[in-house]
Image (cartoon, rainbow, N blue to C red):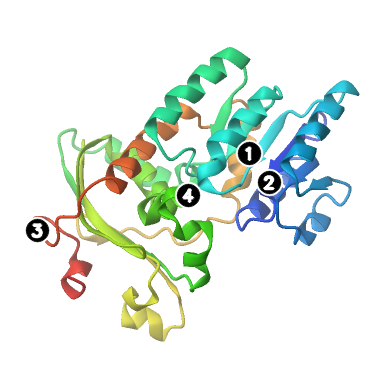
Amino acid sequence: MNIENPKNFGMVGVAGYIAVRHLHAIKETGNNLLASLDKFDSVGRIDSYFPNSDFFVEFERFDRHFDKLKRTGTRIDYVSICSPNYLHDSHIRFALRHQADAICEKPLVLNPWNVEALQQIERETGRNIYTVLQLRLHPKIIELREKIKSGPKNKIWDIDLTYITSRGNWYYISWKGDIQKSGGIATNIGIHFFDMLSWIFGDTKKSTVHLSERDKAAGFLQLENARVRWFLSIDYNDIPDLVKRSGKRTYRSIKVDGEDFEFSEGFTELHTDTYRKILEGKGFGLNDARQSVETAYLIRNSQPEGAHGDYHPFLKSIL
């Protein structure tokens, strides 16, 4: 814990699903949440972590409060950003304008050129932008990366990625169902996996999209050291029957050269580990996020080709 020199945090999007992991991480690392913002006021969760934190539902008053804190000699060191994807760029800029470092949830931004612009703002302000790439801290994934790096240098691995996480009708009504705001399925639920795969197997050399619908997407990625067939879905009907019978609504599978790679456990403290790295000055920054942002953007703006070439096996029952 960082009790000897606690840092002051602000948070944007405190009512969101992922925000509780950030609240937990701030508390576990011994720091303070001074102020938070969300247009939704169902934020009783704050009481379990920082009951004395100020809360705002209007951005203008939140902004003014930051100015007030600065004038009275209280510094906000970090702003945690858990807002909808399309607002990340704006909220990162807000943090840096107030001379705070930004800690932003995935995806960092929706478009590759936003990364370039944010790098310029980093240089102008002297502040840092960090992102949450927690899969890079998962022990099993670190182990897989070491295995690949120590293996044959020219080997091309065959990867099948399948991730189905069921969502109800609310999803399509919320901002997540709007591709202009969320970036669509590939960005909203796939970007962590694209980052993980590029971190292990190298940058994207070629991308083919076979299917792109509002509730599922599939395609093929040629990475430096891997051929990846991927399938992402929020449709419960896509979950294998055996998994449905067990009562589960989520299915995650990664096969490496036909062998199952199991990493279903070990996720509970990854956000806290991310914060510890950031507080040590070792967090993931703009350059780390760049490749997955570019890959997701490329997928989002590609014309689906249907079940041609090297496509994911799940498409056989869909197309």
Q: Which of marks 3 and 4 is in front?
A: 4
Tag 1 residue: 275
Work out how far the residue at label 2 is from the one at label 1, CA to CA, in angstroms: 6 Å
Mark 3 → mark 4, Cα distance in angstroms: 30 Å
Say which label, 3 or 2, has the lower sequence index. 2
Considering only order in the chain, which callout, 1 or 4, is on the residue closer to the N terminus?
Answer: 4
Q: Name the residue under label 2.
A: 25
Residue 176 location (% of width, % of height): 49, 57
Q: Distance between the residues labelled 3 and 1?
A: 43 Å
Image disc number at residue 181? 4
- Amino acid type, residue under disc 1 in the picture: Tyr
Please report whichever mark, 3 or 1, sits nearer to the chain's N-terminal start. Answer: 1
Q: How far across and how far down the image is residue 291, in percent?
A: 35, 34
- Residue, disc 3: 308
Closest to the observer: 278 or 306? 306
Does any portion of residue 32 appear in the rendered image? Answer: no
Estimate how packed mark 2 is, as few (under 14), some (14 to 19) or many (20 or more) residues with alpha carbons within 10 Å.
many
Residue 254 image point, x, y percent: 31, 58
Does residue 224 appear to the left or right of 262 in the view shown? left
Residue at screen point 46% across, 77% down: 248
Residue placed at 49% from the left, 38% from the top? 108
Residue in the foreground of this view, choosing between 68 and 186 = 68
